[in-house]
Image (cartoon, rainbow, N blue to C red):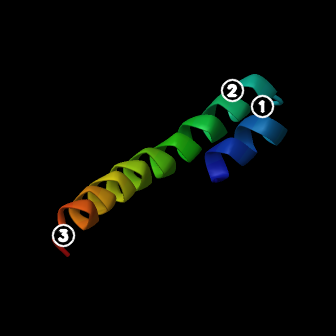
């Protein structure tokens, strides 16, 4: 969070800050998607 803040307001580098924000969101969403997919596969096979 602090790196994005510094890039946006101190360095006035909006494109880099937005790219960093997208990367941070992907770092959260990709593992969640893999977890959701693996848990739904286990449920479909009848294992918990």
Point out the tag, 2 or 1, that comes first from the N-terminus.
1
At x 83%, y 40%, the residue is 9
Q: Is residue 40 above or below residue 20?
A: below
Residue drawn at (63%, 44%) of the image: 3
Q: Mark 2 points at which residue?
A: 16
Which marked residue is nearer to the observer: mark 1 or mark 3? Answer: 3
Q: How crowded is mark 2: few (under 14 residues within 10 Å), some or many (20 or more)?
A: some
Mark 2 or 1: the one toward you: 2
4 or 42: which is nearer to us? 42
- Residue, disc 3: 46
Q: Look at mark 1 in the image and give the residue it sits on.
A: 11
Q: Which mark is residue 22?
A: none
Of mark 1 and mark 3, the one earlier in the sequence is 1
Q: How far apart are marks 1 and 3 (CA)?
A: 53 Å
Residue 40 or residue 5, whichever sits in front: 40
Q: Which of 17 and 32 is in front in this view?
A: 32
Which of pointers 3 and 2 indicates the residue nearer the eye? 3
40 vs 12, left or right, is: left
Task: Tell whether 45 sits left or right of 43.
Answer: left
In the displayed structure, would residue 19 be above or below residue 1?
above
Q: Residue at x 48, y 51 (%)?
A: 28
Asked which quadrant contains residue 36, the reply is bottom left
Q: What element carries label 1?
A: loop
Residue 41: x and y in percent read 26, 56
């Amino acid at each position: 969070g602090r790196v994005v803040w510094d890039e946006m307001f101190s360095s006035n580098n909006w494109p880099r800050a937005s790219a960093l924000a997208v990367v941070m969101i992907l770092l959260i969403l990709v593992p969640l998607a893999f977890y959701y997919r693996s848990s739904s596969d286990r449920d479909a096979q009848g294992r918990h």
